[in-house]
């Protein structure tokens, strides 16, 4: 009788991370594709200008939009796709500035809107207590 020597296999205690990397890559691709689609707001054509971007990392801005018809949209305290009156914009901005006087206010104006509508909005924001207002461009 010949006895064969049994080979004792050692247990492998390493984790195979390749499947986890595959899953992470798929999730990354999904997020990269869907992130631009999640931007909500009114569709406006912004004017083109060469300017430096504003640092908004520590203070999320309030964006007030003026569309081609001169309607106002505000992204705080309601539906950002629903037009609001000038009085509502002034009231909401005044409340926001009372709670946070350093809040950044940005105006998104369609390039087809008349200059008077943008100036009226900026005047409205000044009456609400805004010291400075930024303009959004592409």
Image: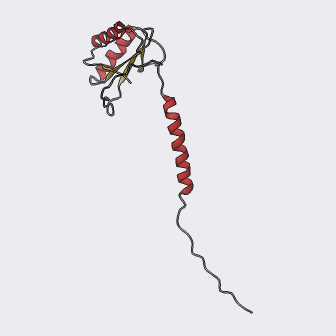
Instruction: Determine the residue positioned at 30% across, 22% down.
Output: 99
- Position of 112 compared to 28: left or right? left
Residue found at x 44% / y 13% = 67
Regarding residue 43, the answer to whether it shows in the image is yes
Residue 22 placement (x, y as % from top left): 55, 51
Q: Nearer the viewer, residue 128 or 113?
A: 113
The C terminus sits in image quarter: top left
Quadrant where the image shows the N terminus: bottom right
Q: Give the percent coordinates (x, y) of residue 73.
A: 43, 15
In the displayed image of the protein, which residue is found farthest to the bottom? 1
Q: Position of residue 94 (x, y in %)?
A: 31, 15
Q: Residue at x 62, y 81 (%)?
A: 7
Furthest toward the right, the residue is: 1
Q: Is residue 115 above or below residue 31?
A: above
Where residue 50 sits in the image (x, y, percent)? 32, 25
Q: Does the rendering let one see residue 79? A: no
**Residue 112 or 27: which is nearer the viewer?**
112
The colour scheme is secondary structure
Q: Is residue 75 above or below residue 31?
A: above
Which of the 4 image quadrants contains residue 116?
top left
**Which residue is more in the foreground, 114 or 118?**
114
Total marks in image = 0
């Amino acid at each position: 009788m010949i006895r064969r020597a049994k080979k004792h296999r050692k247990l492998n205690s390493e984790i195979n991370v390749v499947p986890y990397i595959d899953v992470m890559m798929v999730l990354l691709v999904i997020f990269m594709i869907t992130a631009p689609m999640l931007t909500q707001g009114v569709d406006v054509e912004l004017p083109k200008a060469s300017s430096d971007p504003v640092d908004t990392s520590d203070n999320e801005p309030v964006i007030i939009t003026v569309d081609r018809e001169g309607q106002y949209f505000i992204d705080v305290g309601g539906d950002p796709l629903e037009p609001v009156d000038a009085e509502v914009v002034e009231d909401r901005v005044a409340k926001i500035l009372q709670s946070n006087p350093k809040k950044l206010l940005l105006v998104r104006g369609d390039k087809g809107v008349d200059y008077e509508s943008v100036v009226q909005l900026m005047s409205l924001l000044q009456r609400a207590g805004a010291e400075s207002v930024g303009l959004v461009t592409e």
